[in-house]
Amino acid sequence: MTLRVTIVMYHYVRRLAATRFPRLTGLDLDAFRGQLAYVAKHYAPVSVLDILAAVRGETELPPRPIVLTFDDGYAEHYREVMPLLAEARIPGVFFPAAASLVDRRVLDVNKIQFVLAAADTPDLVANAIDRAIEREAGRDDVKAPAAYRADGWKPVRFDPPAASYVKYMLQSALPADLRASVLDSLFARFVSADERAFADELYFTPDHARELAQAGMTIGCHADRHLTLTSLPRDGQAAEIDGSLRVLDVIGQPRSPFVFSYAKGAHNADSLALLHARGCTLAVTNRPSIATLAPDTLLMLPRLDANHLPFDGLAPPNEWTLHA
């Protein structure tokens, strides 16, 4: 019998009307409540331990099993999400990054998101990046703004050209040292000059993580600095994975076994080998599909985005639910 499970991925879950950054893309808390009602009606929530036991043949999964996962360790996951999960008796899996949880640093991916949410327009940010490039005109590894725009100024999924250009420049196009300095400058200008204070506002703490675990939630590892593993050589991947295990150290859990969420879902053969060698029992990607469970698939399980399921408990089963 084929074992299948629906795994759902969440990031920001917040009261959007009350946030200081209304343009930040996220899931409104009321929509999340509606989705929990839909899940309770059409699925059987299970834990990671249930999945692993089923793969080992120690137990059977109920019809339409589902696992809810929450990436990046945001404070709202502790403050808003955990009470709703506990009330509904739904176990969750939380994947904080070590740099944010332990070091209280704002992840680069979040800096970019908040810069774009805080600036009046993405063009304002794009122009600021171009001016920073022009000041580095003497560097052999930096091109003219027009050359970068030729490659990166285009719509990508839901992003208009200016926003996709900002992400392109600050995620990959610029040399690493310039990328970091430009992003830090933009974050200080548009968002906050006090990164530590902003991190304390944005992310839950080690104490909160321990409370989540005590409430029956699973704490997994996401990354050290939220670097995409496939952008790194094997030794760099090893360092990023090993750094991510500091999450378990700080909350007093053993390093093995553990569960892992790939930053941006990216992984390759080196990633799988490194995780396996360190005792990882389950890892999730961002590929949208229903997961098929088997010993050789547990380190590359797909996940649906929250937007793939309805946000109304009265909604009829959609295509993903019927497929499950």
Image: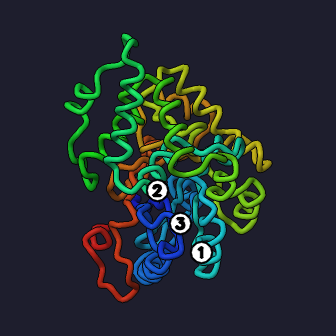
Q: Nearer the viewer, residue 289 or 206?
A: 206
* Labels 3 and 1: the sequence-earlier one: 3
Which residue in the structure is indicated by mark 2?
Answer: 118
Crowding at dot 1, Cα within 10 Å, few <14 / some 14-19 / many 20+, comes out as: some
Residue 96 shows in the view: yes
Task: Indicate whether 151 appears above or below 71.
Answer: above
- Residue drawn 41% across the image and 59% down it: 3
Which residue in the structure is indicated by mark 1?
Answer: 85
Residue type at numbered disc 3: Arg
Q: Which of 288 and 48 is in front in this view?
A: 288
Point out residue 6 in the picture as x, y percentages from the top left corner. Answer: 41, 63
Crowding at dot 2, Cα within 10 Å, few <14 / some 14-19 / many 20+, comes out as: many
Left/right placement of residue 274 relative to residue 65 reads: right
Which residue in the structure is indicated by mark 3?
Answer: 20
Q: Report the number of discs.
A: 3
Q: Are marks 3 and 2 in contact (CB under 8 Å)?
A: no
Q: What element carries label 3?
A: loop
From mark 3 to mark 2, how far is it between C-alphas? 9 Å
Crowding at dot 3, Cα within 10 Å, few <14 / some 14-19 / many 20+, comes out as: few
Residue 44 shows in the view: no
- Residue drawn 36% across the image and 89% down it: 314
Left/right placement of residue 292 relative to residue 52 reads: left
